[in-house]
Amino acid sequence: MVIVWEAADRICGKRLKAALPGLVAAMERHGHLSLDEEVRRQLLEVSAATMDRMLAPMREAAGLGRRRRSASISALKRRVPIRTFSDWDDPAPGYFEADFVVHCGGSLAGSVVHSFVLTDVASGWTESVPLIVREQALVVEAIKLLRTQLPVPLKGIDTDNDSAFINESLIGYCEAEGLELTRSRPYRKNDQAWIEQKNGAVVRRLVGYGRLEGAAATRALIRLARVARLYVNFFQPSFKLREKVREGGKVRKHYFPPATPCERLLGDARVNDEAKDRLRATLTELDPVVLLRDLRTAQAEVAAHQGLGNVEPTDETTEDVDLFLAQFPMLWKMGEVRPTHRVRPRKTRTWRTRIDPFEDVWPEIRSWLEAEPDLTGKRLFDRLEKEYPGQHSPGQLRTLQRRVRGWRQAAARALIATRFEPNNEVGDVLC
């Protein structure tokens, strides 16, 4: 059995059982194996399970012990039921999807900041809190913090299969608090469609894709999240899917009219009057322009930690708000106004990637141009061919024409600057 197992490249018992007849016949045919009839009969009649039991000591000694998923993880997953996209069926406000957004800048090396995000399935209300590391104990603390600022009581949490969620800490907390904990199917992101949409439309839109690490960056992101939750949930309408209808090969989606999460909660009969009164009172006190000004200030600080700029402290006064508002009519000319999404400026290129073919003869070409400024690049190139036959190829004509055009532009600028100096007669007349 061991000889045949090694010849089959140490495959499992089920595969070895299927390969055994052909493998034994081939080995005997080429003289690698000589079996008694009784031994051959017993070998071919052994079941796959018996093969695995017989070969278990050899596998263990060879370092090929049976790889099994952790029993504790499997047991934990069995305690958390699966909820798919179609299982929600218009839940009441209070059932949230949870997920992480990693701010790694494209590289997961080292320790980076993670945003823990909660999104209400019914209203789209979104909360986030940055965590300096992704750790299960911090997830529980983040949920405790967010529960104090949610507009409705937390009733349930739906997560993915991340070990930061499927663990004794979170399961025990939900059981103790009477919260319904569910999870999505592995590799089925559509099961968490609501939180995945907010990860991009809220977190990525505000924070960008830069790398954030360390306590200082976490504190800056906390300040941004504190302002963003008010601006997004009270003043940013969003679409919500009403239904999907398949018509042949097309899927047509129908949406409810755009509304803010606050408006959806105020219009939901399942939300009690006390919660609605708190929402109305908060909405009355909020100034969207002040929130946007604070949002841009917090984004500038986060962008500085991402290496996209410097932190410039802003004095939060009435004059600053008025100045900020006065910029709105012409702000569109600046292009991207979110500091976290501005493109890092490229360095001015001052080097050449190829050798200048006219470096040695350029002083002579310039003297020809100064004597006859109307010379074209083609005539200059023909003169060079006569003076230095075979030194330049026809493909370099375009390079010479660009050099000549650049010289003429520089000469024109110098001439204009000289003519309009204050001590010049023409300049005195124009001044």
Image (spheres, grey):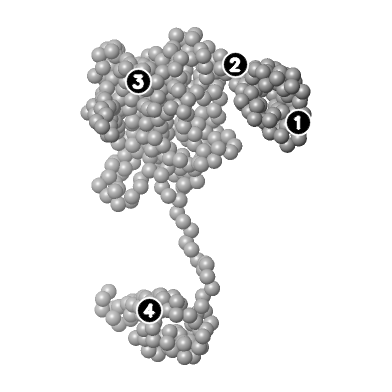
Q: Residue at x 75, y 28 (%)?
A: 3
Q: CA distance from mark 2 to mark 1?
A: 44 Å
Q: Which residue is mark 3?
A: 86
For marks 1 and 3 on the same chain, the one whose residue lies earlier in the sequence: 1
Q: Residues within 10 Å of mark 1 (few under 14, many from 20)?
A: few
Q: Which residue is mark 2?
A: 72
Q: Are marks 2 and 1 in contact (CB under 8 Å)?
A: no
Q: Quadrant of the N terminus?
A: top right
Q: Amino acid at mark 1?
A: Leu
Q: Amino acid at mark 2?
A: Ser
Between disc 1 and disc 3, the foreground one is: 1
| Residue 11 drawn at (x, y percent) | 65, 28
For marks 4 and 2 on the same chain, the one whose residue lies earlier in the sequence: 2
Q: Which mark is residue 33?
A: 1
For marks 4 and 1 on the same chain, the one whose residue lies earlier in the sequence: 1
Question: Looking at the image, is 336 positioned above or below residue 100?
Answer: below
Q: CA distance from mark 2 to mark 3?
A: 29 Å
Q: Residue at x 27, y 29 (%)?
A: 246
